[in-house]
Amino acid sequence: MALPLSYSWRNVRARPMRSLLTTSVIALVVLACTLLMGLISSMQSTFTETGHELNLIVLRKGSDNDGSSQISLEAYQAVRYFDGIARQPEGDQPLISPELVVQPFFRTLDGGRENVLVRGVEAIALDVHDQVHISEGRMFKRSAGEAIVGRGVAGRYEGATLGEELEFGRGRWKVVGIFDADATSFESEVWVDVRELASDAKRTIPFSGARIRAASKADLETLERRIDDDPRYALDAKAETLYYEEQSSASATLYIIVIAVAVLAGVGASFGAANTMYAAVQARTAEIGTLRALGFSRGSILWAFQAEAVFLALLGFVLGAAGAAIAAEVLTSALGGVAVGAETFTTSVIHVRIHSGNLLGALILSLAIGMASGFGPAWRAARLAPIEALRKA
Amino acid sequence: MDAPMIDVRHVSRHYLRGGDDVHALDDVSLSIPAGKFVALMGPSGSGKSTLLNLISGIDRPSSGEVIVSGQALPDLSEDELARWRARHVGLIFQFFNLIPVLSALENVALPLLLTDLGKAERRERAETALRVVGLEDRLDHFPATMSGGEQQRVAIARAIVTDPDLIVADEPTGDLDAKNAEAILDLLRTLKKGFGKTVVMVTHDPRALRFVDDAHHLDKGLLLDDDAAERASAALHASMGPGPRTTEVEP
């Protein structure tokens, strides 16, 4: 039988200061990596969940985002009557939302300047983007100089609170509502009346694009083909989910960078933990000799010291993961989220959440640190000849 | 005549230290019958501890044979030797060698982890062993909270808990005061008398001669003959002088 785990655990506790220092180094690595992984996965989910699986985005051919696209009123009117578009439950209007996007600078409360995505929409936008709900105030009225702002915008910029006025373009826009959008990137937008925005921006072509809710998955594919193939307007239709996935493609690169950082930091932490474990083997040489003399095998010694290193790493994981969860909560609650630049050069506010996948990643990293740091010292301990080890008594 | 418990035949143990070839033991032959309490005596560097390590299977001879309970030890692999030690030998060290993070009871139960016994039986046996050495009220104490004498008793309990045929003790009184040293020697004698164990002890302590059945003297790696041993023993007694004396200090 192997030495009991309590032997390894009590040895971790027997040298509290050294164990605490080693654990702290591992905890810091875990904290940083978990938080970065949480930020990136939250960023990805913010973008990918923005798209609805039955929604199409219609842009001018060659545009890869609605900030650089224009479609004419005529094109919009033609598409509006295509078959396969879902209809409003009341009113029987086709669920197509013509939209205009501009990206003015807003002044943040702490004096900075950020590009914010202002989306001109009609009331039907609330049916097409059905994750958007007005949680405070009301919807804007047409041609009344009114705006509604997303949860991530509210309180972040000058004038972006209910009843205050935003200044952008040529006019002033009174904030009459605040909307939630299930933590998707719509929450980082300002919505106003599309025709009023076109007039303010002096746009002769009133729309950047349109969003369409297809009646079914099959209709979505048919509509997509029909819009793409229509020779009159040079339009490009794309599934909204795909569009937002492409918008978040930068985060995939970030993920690789974070993994590389995690590996490098993990190697550093492993050296620290290995140093502690080598010192433990050195200090307990006579003890190892005694255990070997009593009849414990090399495997038992290897296991006991390896378990000790893994205990240190698991303690680091628990502390680091708890630290990351607290940091994520502080970033989201106290600071209102983390602002990142989206592909459209506008600011998206990300609510950092630590997902179970992030924790699993951090746990694997911790276990790897424990195994890597423990193996060398444990191997050395296991290879000590009992007679040589006992002489150190 | 029965085969001896310990049969050491023409054993030598040489090793290199700092480039020098050290002859720790040279052609030593010795046999010890079962159920005897035997002391191995001699000055520092005489080879007595080396001989004890060979008998207990902690070390291997450079040449010659060591047969204990009919088992030729040099034939065993490293892991076989470890298993053999766990079954047949109880070890007692000068500095007790208890595991600091384990309680007295856990220290004593440690060798039982290498047996097939269940948890309850391991505990029961460890408690019995601690009762034999008079420490039944110190089960949950940790080594750091016990006196030297108590720690050595825990070590003796650990040595007997697996009910081994052979108990080997390396300077068991070397780190104890006179009173505790006598108590430990008496306890070792009880193991022989009361439990029929074979006890082999390395010691500098001339007091031990009063407790043992037989003493073998070594010097410079050689086992002394009877005449030389008698002279060595007389010299050792003379060195005690009048009045109480504690431990011998190695030069």
Image (cartoon, coloured by chain):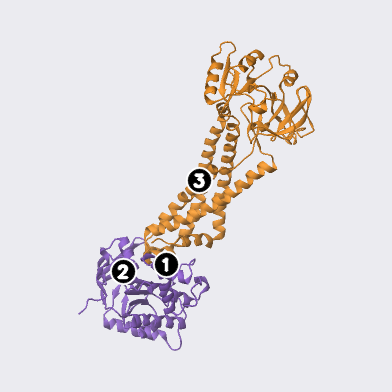
Chain colours: A orange, B purple
SS assignment at label 3 = helix
Find the distance from the CA under tag 2 to the CA under tag 3: 46 Å
Find the distance from the CA under tag 3 to the CA under tag 1: 35 Å
Residue that mark 3 sits on: A365
SS assignment at label 2 = helix
Q: Is residue A335 left or right of residue B215?
A: right
Q: Same chain, marks 2 and 3?
A: no
Question: Badge 3 sits on which subunit?
Answer: A
Image quarter of residue B54: bottom left
- What's the mark number on residue B119? 1
In the rendered image, is residue B97 in sight?
Answer: no
- In this rendering, is residue B219 above or below A226? below
At a point 30% along the width and 84% down the height, the residue shown is: B230
Residue that mark 2 sits on: B54
Q: Residue A151: percent from the left, percent from the top? A: 69, 35
SS assignment at label 1 = helix
Q: Is residue A43 left or right of residue A120?
A: left
Quick one: B231 or B150, which is closer to the camera?
B150
Residue type indicated by callout 1: Lys
Residue type indicated by callout 2: Leu
In terms of sequence position, does the residue under pointer 1 or pointer 2 come before the other? 2
Q: Residue B165: percent from the left, percent from the top? A: 31, 74
Residue type indicated by callout 3: Leu
Image quarter of residue A105: top right
Quadrant in which the C terminus of chain A is drawn: bottom left
Q: Is residue A116 left or right of residue A46?
A: right
Q: Same chain, marks 3 and 1?
A: no
